[in-house]
Structures are given as structure tokens and as C-alpha cells.
Image: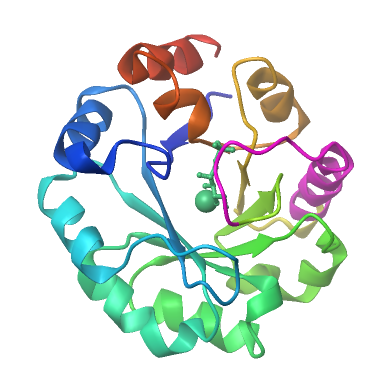
Amino acid sequence: MKPILSPSILTADFTRLGDTIQIINKSSADWIHLDIMDGVYVPNISFGFPVIESIKKIAAKPLDVHLMIEDADRYINRFRDAGADILTVHYEACVHLQRTLANIRALGMKAGVALNPHTPVMLLKNLLRYTDMVLIMTVNPGFGGQTFVEESWSKIAEMRRMIDESGYDILIQVDGGVDLSNAVKLVETGVNVLVAGNTVFGSPDPAATIEKFVKLF
Ligand code: DX5
Ligand code: ZN
């Protein structure tokens, strides 16, 4: 089945953020992936509410917001107000994850859980009822342009089996090192949502690269 494509703007040219969003608006991409980093949970700081609010004003596609932050509970309503449509928190950064996911849904957003490369998918077994999307990190979070972690393949397949057996309608997203050479195999393994940052915005023609992704399917 045709996957959802969610370009990450992390490695785009931030002096031309409006142009970047317009490229995605006019493209065949489905969502806009925004990476929020707090400098504590991950060793990098990206951008926050004012930038998300500005993007929301011109975005023609849903905002897929990936939180790499500690204490996400404090900010869930602010991300909703800033314009998030899908809000993903990290398993490793949430002490009361069931409550966090329920709160995200209660505020009208889709609830996502991200797993770092070392975190087994089995840990989500008792949370599937509260989850709209599982983000399997295929790199360690914090930076764009890293190398895909090969152990991810079996995690994706295992997650796919677990979701199918549960009967819940849950998307699998992958993020990190996704490119034109592994995208088809990822989808065949069970992925529904492809995030691509460096492959798109590190290329000379991001709009053309997005269309190359879409034409693979
Ligand atoms: C990494 C971020 C990713 C990143 C993906 O921490 O969550 O969304 O932008 O980057 P690429 O596609 O460049 O590996
Ligand atoms: Zn991300």
C-alpha cells in the first residue's frame, strides 16, 4: 500500500523556512515532520513554539511533531495550540506513558510513541489501545543525516506482527537514514509512514526528490 511521506525540515535552510514549507505544500508529500529537541533528552536543540506557530499559518498539510524532550506532559496543550496534528513522545522520556498518550488524544491530536534503537517493541504490548502511531527510530535521535541502524528491520517486522495480532489501527513510522534505496523494503516490511530529512533537503532539488519517493510506490 502507498505509504504516507513526511519530510523532515531539520536539515532544510532555516533562512528560507517559508519556501521550504511551500515546497512541501505543493508536493505530493502527506505530512510535515517537525523535530523538537530540548538539549537534555538529546544532545541538540532545534526549535520551539514560535517556529511551529509560524509554520502552521502557511502549512497545507498536517504537522507531524516529534518530541525529543523530557517532561513532555508539561507542554502537550502548548503543542496542540501551536498547531500539532500528530504528537509523538519518546517511550524512554515518559514516566507515565499511558496517561501522556491519553492526554494527547483528549486534546484532539493523534498520539505517537517513539522507540530508540535499543528499546524493544515488546514494551508497547500493553499500550496499543492508546496508540495511533509507533515511531521506530532507525537512528539515535538528535541529528539528521545519520546512518540507518540495521537492527531496525527485525523491530519493524515484529511491531507489524504485534499490531496485526492486536487488531488495532496503528501506523508504523520510521525516522532516520530513510532514502530512495531502502524506502520500498521498509514499506514491504510493514512501515506506513516514511520520514525523510537529509535525503530530501540535502538534495539539490527537494521538490523533485519528494516526487521520486512518491513514484517508488
Ligand atoms: C533525528 C530526527 C529525524 C531526522 C531524520 O533525530 O528525528 O527526523 O530529521 O533525518 P534524516 O532523514 O536526515 O536521517
Ligand atoms: Zn524526527
Percent x, y for residue 155? 84, 47
Percent x, y for residue 19? 17, 32
What are the residue bounds of the magenta stretch?
142-164
Quadrant where ligand 1 appears: top right
144 inside magenta stretch: yes
In the image, is 176 to the left or to the right of 122? left
Number of marks: 0
Residue 189 vertical placement versus 119 (above, below): above
In the image, is 143 to the left or to the right of 185? left
| Quadrant of the image containing the C terminus | top right
Tell me which residue sits at (52%, 74%) in the image.
69
Q: How is the image coloured?
A: rainbow
Tell me which residue sits at (79%, 54%) in the image.
117
- Is residue 5 in view? yes
- Is residue 60 in view? no
Residue 129 vertical placement versus 65 (above, below): below
Percent x, y for residue 4? 48, 34
Residue at the extreme left: 57
Tell me which residue sits at (69%, 68%) in the image.
128
| Quadrant of the image containing the N terminus | top right
